[in-house]
Amino acid sequence: MSQQDARIQPKQHFEILDGLRGVAAMIVVIFHMCEAWNGGDHARQIVNHGYLAVDFFFILSGFVVAYAYDDRWHPTNGQPRMTVWDFFKRRLIRLQPMVVMGTVLGALLFYPGASAKVFPLIAGTSVSRLLLIALIGCTLIPIPVSMDIRGWQEMHPLDSAAWSLIFEYIANIGYALGLRKVSNRVLLVLTALSAALLTHYLVTTPRGDITGGWTLNAIELKIGFVRLFYPFMAGMLLQRLHKRIRVRNAFLWCSLLLVLTFVLPRFGTPATLWKNGLYEALVVILVYPVIVAMGAGEQITGRAITRLCRFSGAVSYPLYITHYALIYIYTAWVADGKFTPAQGVAWGAALFFTAIAIAYACLKLYDEPVRRWLNRRFLVTGTTTP
């Protein structure tokens, strides 16, 4: 560790944005529980557009990364220049420990979620093969369909949610190696082109929505990159242009607007799926940047709302990356008819609060201590990674 690196200090978080990240993560848990009852048919569930939370995460990521790191490459306040390797270390320390935990939980709960109706490959998966997939999963390296051990063709069959972290890392690599260097005008052009690409995909796809990105094949990778490009660069652009919208009670209004985008019914009919695609394009391209600008435009002062936002933001990433181990079991139980829909609501509520409890325990007992140790070992004593 150099003396220059030791002088780099972390920045304060936008607490409302942290809180909104937690709201979105909680909606993801509910959305995945609902999927267990409708076989993935998003036209037949309450949280119809819950998958858009990932796209919201991407725009938050672009905003926060630009805010935290843009001025560290050529600082003017006496701080040293940050290197690309410094940046990669910080992002790895921030994200990778919970990737490992999500994979470990998925491995521990793999066999309890066995159900031939929804997971046809579990029964034939040996412990040695499970351990191999778990080891690969801890590195976040995606596996091909030929190595699937569950039957859903996921990049990470022990932790489905980890697919978006691969694209998060890709965005961070792109930022460090190129995007951070472009002018605002160039970034605006790239953002506009990516918005056009996103819109074209959504109004022409036979799916009628933006779902996808979790399988290692050409079609799903295309979807993943289409989902990534616009939100991440739009978040960067919002921060660089210092776009803020000042609204009183911003956390409340942003939360309500965010949830509304998730729960509105699907638009159009099977013959006019482009209408639903157009709705999702408008949400990602216009509504989510407005929500981020509103969330960044107000500093909360109330003690209760401050604690709520801090807690929500703190558990958001652990909740997102660990909850799917429980979803697999819940989905298996639904498929095997172990409870009625009414009982499923009670079990779903129990799963929801259990997932939050597990996330909080992972945060306090594992993630924060591990990141503190990694910061001391590889960065600087007393600093944290944004």
Image (cartoon, rainbow, N blue to C red):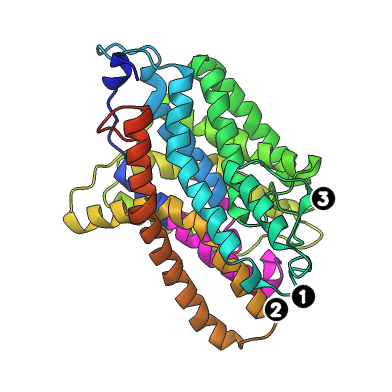
Q: Which residue is mark 1?
A: 117
**Which circle, 3 or 2, is nearer the viewer?**
3
Position of residue 16 measured from the top left corner of the image (x, y, whole percent)? 32, 47
Q: Which residues are magenta?
A: 23-52
Residue at image location 56% in from the left, 40% down from the top: 285
Q: Which residue is mark 2?
A: 335
Numbered disc 2: secondary structure: helix
Q: Quadrant of residue 64?
A: top left
Quadrant (top left, top right, bottom left, bottom right) of the C terminus: top left
* Cα separation between marks 1 and 3: 20 Å
Residue count near mark 2 (Cα–Cα under 10 Å), binned few <14, some 14–19, many ≥20: some
Magenta stretch containing residue 30, yes or no? yes
The answer to whether any part of residue 237 appears in the image is no
Q: Can you say whether 291 is above or below 304 in the image? A: above
Left/right of residue 200 with respect to residue 20 in the rendered view? right
Residue at image location 44% in from the left, 16% down from the top: 83
Residue 146 tag number: 3
Q: Quadrant of residue 203?
A: top right
Numbered disc 1: secondary structure: loop
- Mark 3: which amino acid? Ser
- Mark 1: which amino acid? Lys
- Give the mark nearest the N terminus, 3 or 2: 3
- Give the mark nearest the N terminus, 1 or 3: 1
Q: Are marks 2 and 1 in contact (CB under 8 Å)?
A: yes
Q: Can you say whether 111 is above or below 171 in the image? A: below
Quadrant (top left, top right, bottom left, bottom right) of the N terminus: top left
